[in-house]
Image: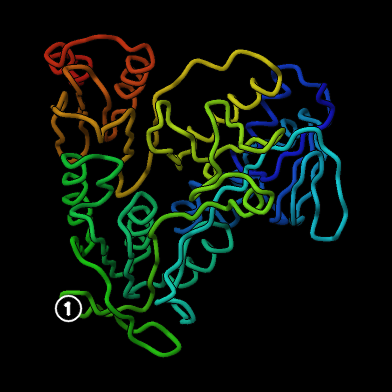
Amino acid sequence: MIGTIAIIGANVAGVTTAAELRRLGFEGRILLFDSEAAPLYERPPLSKALLIGEMDQACEAPLLTAAELADLRLDLEFATLVRGIAPGRVELSSGRQVDADVMVIATGGRARRSPAFEHRDGVHVLRTEADALALRAALSPGAEVVVMGAGVVGCEVASSAIRRGCATTLVDVAAAPMLRCLGAEAAHVMATVCQQAGADMRFGAGIAAVEGRSHVQGLLLEDGERLPCDVLVVGIGMAANDELARGAGAEVDDGILVDDACRTSLPGVFAVGDVARRRAPGGGPARRVETIMNAQVQARETAAALLGLAPPAPQPQWFWSDQFGLNIQAVGEVARSDRVGWARPFDGREGVLLHFSDDRLCGAVSFNRGREMARLRRLLARGDDQTPEALLGDPDLAGAA
């Protein structure tokens, strides 16, 4: 019988695990550890509201209200570094050891850094509240800002930098912004959106060198072009914080390898969220998905597994982003589509793009059309077998009156 569960990481994955355990009836002790002094905040506002000054602190967007947190009856230990884990035991950096029947690792990840850009002022990453506040202070009007990496966070940072009056350039080796998560058609729409908003762009380009001894002054691209640069934002992805599991002997590979119930290779140890890399059925490549929805889904699966309950119904992957005046949402697996079609052609403000594989809906992207996206998420969750012609001709998806 499980009496005590230790959750390491007070992010959305860790907090959702605790909340789901209580919702499912767990009455035992739940310990929640985090290395930050004031965690329990939402991360999406870091690149938007906090960066542009609409928020002063991350705590203005809490994961839980004070009342909700009290209802969970957690033993909270913040500003506490977990140094190691072993079966039935958590070891803290202070040397104190805490007993726990089960552990859930929700340590998330950290922004990837490039050694070539370290040890210079003016180089920033964005992952924590401290990162966001430092970057905001650097984004003064007129500053020459280069964002290296045009993924979701990189594009959000570029949008915020432009709003703060900075001359902003996006640089990426890919052919278009957010290409991996949106697919080619929607990514090229985003390239037009970024350009019309005032972003300069260099796609299919890498950075060869950084100029400036103590402070970044310019960037030399691989094709020989020089870009002036006062502020360099490195947005080249996230590295999983899997050191605890690695040190305990768990199987790791750019994340902690887990099964379909988020169990690690260590008995009594689970991993959820950005740090977890799920093994694919049939021996396919393991996947690590860095979205809020994935963290929430894995947390619910883990809570059910811990209590011996049936897992929740599977849900298609989904994410959203607010940038350049658009609410962008994507659902499903756009990368495996063999056909795309606009249910509502993008008009500069709104649009709905559908992705199909073997004549079945496999994903979708929407621009400022949340109602249609909600319906598409339901269709994908149910596995409805509607033809491309039926969906592409649907007046509801096209936004007709």
Quarter-of-image position of residue 308: top right
The residue positioned 35% from the left and 75% from the top of the image is 143
- Dot 1: few (<14), some (14–19), or many (≥20) neighbours within 10 Å? few
Position of residue 134 measured from the top left corner of the image (x, y, whole percent):
53, 68
Q: Secondary structure at mark 1?
A: loop
Q: Is residue 170 left or right of residue 191?
A: right
* Residue visible at 76% across and 51% down in the picture: 78
Quadrant containing the C terminus is top left
Judging from the image, the colouring scheme is: rainbow
Q: Nearer the viewer, residue 39 or 9?
A: 9
**Residue 235 occupies which quadrant of the picture?**
bottom left
What residue is at 36 percent from the left and 72 percent from the top? 141
Counting from the top left corner in percent of width and height, residue 103 is at: 72, 37
Name the residue carrying label 1: 225
52 displayed left or right of 70 = left
Q: Nearer the viewer, residue 280 or 181?
A: 280
Left or right? Give the position of 353 relative to 102: left
Q: Amino acid at mark 1?
A: Glu
Q: Position of residue 206 (x, y in %)?
A: 25, 68
Identified at 20% across, 21% down, the residue is 399
367 or 72, nearer to the observer: 72
Q: Is residue 180 above or below residue 137?
A: above
**Residue lying farthest bottom?**
213
